[in-house]
Amino acid sequence: MCGTERACWTGEPVVLVVARTRAEAEDTAACVAIQRLELPVVADKKGALAPGTPPIHRQLTDNLAFRKIDTGDIEAVFARADRVIEGTFEFARHTAVRLEPRCVLADYEEATGKLTITTSSQCPHRIQRVFAATLGVPDHKVQIIAPDVGSFGLKIHTYGDELATCAAMRLGRPVKLVADRLEAFVSDIHTRENFVRARIAVSKAGDIEAFDVDVLSGAGAYAQYPRTSVLEGTQILNITGGPYKHKHYRGRASIVYLNEPPSSQYRAAGHPIGNALREHLVDRAAAALGIDAVEIVARNVIPDEGYPAIAPSGVTLKGLSHARCLDVLVERVG
C-alpha cells in the first residue's frame, strides 16, 4: 500500500509491507521497486531562507515555519553599555536513544468491531483518541494496553507507521511494528538543532543590563503530533533571559523546514540551550570585568523575596529560590 507520493526526508515511510515474520517482511521490502524523482534538498538551516532556495512543501512560498520577536529598548542599552559580550552557539540535532524501541501491536475483532492496541506509548488515553478519530472507530471500541514504559517525551508523539499497524482491520490478523535502532535514528523525533547569536550588556559594577538573542532552529519536515516543531525555539527565548533583574530583552526565533526527520521536543524543551548560552555569556562578562562568576550571579538574580515576578521574556516566575540555592552551592562546593 502506498503511503505517500512525496517523501520529505530519508526515513519517511512510503510503502507498507506485512509478512508472517520480520525476515520475510525485510526480504519482501527489498523486492519493492520505487520510481523516484529526486527533488532539490534543503538540509542546511542557514540557507533554508536564502533567495532561490525552494520550499520543501509545494503549497508554501518559503521554508519559514515560525518567527517570534520580543523587543525592549535594546539598541539604546547596548549603545551605552560599559561592556558588551557576544557569541555564536551551535547545537547539533539529536534524538533520544532509549533502551526500549517504539513498538505497536494491533489486533482487530471483526465480529465486535473492537480494536486492541498494545503500545509502548507513554500517553494511552491520548493514543486512544488519536486511533479512534483517525480510523473512524468509536472511542469505546478502541482498547489501549500500555505496559510499563521508559521514555522522556519521545513516546508522547504519534507516528504514522504506528497507525499503519491498523492494517489489521483489513487483513483480519494482528499486525506488529517494532522500530529497530537504525530505523529509529531516521524515524523518531529529533530535536535541539539550533544556531544562536546572543549578546549581553553589562555595567562596570557587574549589573546585567540587557540580553539580545537570535535563534535559528531547524524543524525538520513536519511537526510531530501532538507537539509542535516550534516550541524548542520559542522556549529558548523564554529561558535565556534567566531569573535576572534586567528589564531589557529581545528575542527572535526563526524556525525553518528542512528535509530531515520531524523535530519536536522532550525533556525540558529549550532549557539546556537557553541556560547554557546565558550562563556562558554571564561567565565571560564576569571574566571581562574581573568579577567572580558567583558574585555577578548573586548581584543580578531575582531575590527570593522578589517572587512572584515577571521574567524579562514575559514569563511569570513564582516559588523560586535561586539566591538560596546559590548560597548552598557555594557553601557545599567550598
Image (cartoon, helix red, strand yellow):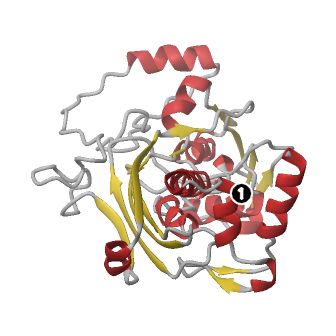
Does residue 126 sit above or below 171 in this rendering? below
Image x and y of residue 95, in percent: 57, 38
For the point 36% across and 39% down, the residue is: 9
Q: Position of residue 26 (x, y in %)?
A: 52, 18
Residue drawn at (70%, 76%) of the image: 302
In this rendering, position of residue 63 left or right of residue 89 = left
State the residue position of label 1.
113
Instruction: Residue 107: name its quadrant.
Output: top right
The type of residue carrying mark 1 is: Gly
The correct choice, above or below, for 84 with respect to 99 in the image is: below
Tell which of 141 and 93 is nearer to you: 93
- Res. 243 in view: no
Residue sitting nearer the eye, 6 or 311: 311
* Residue lying furthest left: 52
* Residue 261 in the image, given as x and y percentages of width and height: 44, 42
- The N terminus lies in quadrant: top left
Q: Nearer the viewer, residue 301 or 242?
A: 301
How would you rate the neighbour count of disc 1 (Cα within 10 Å): few for under 14, some for 14-19, many for 20 or more? few
Q: Is residue 67 left or right of residue 63?
A: right
| Placement of 228 over or under 30, stated as above or below | below
Q: Residue at x 56, y 48 (%)?
A: 159
Please report the residue visible at 21 percent of the width from the left and 56 percent of the height from the top. 58
Residue 71: quarter of image: bottom left
Instruction: Please state which of residues 63 and 244 is positioned toward the viewer in this rendering.
Output: 244
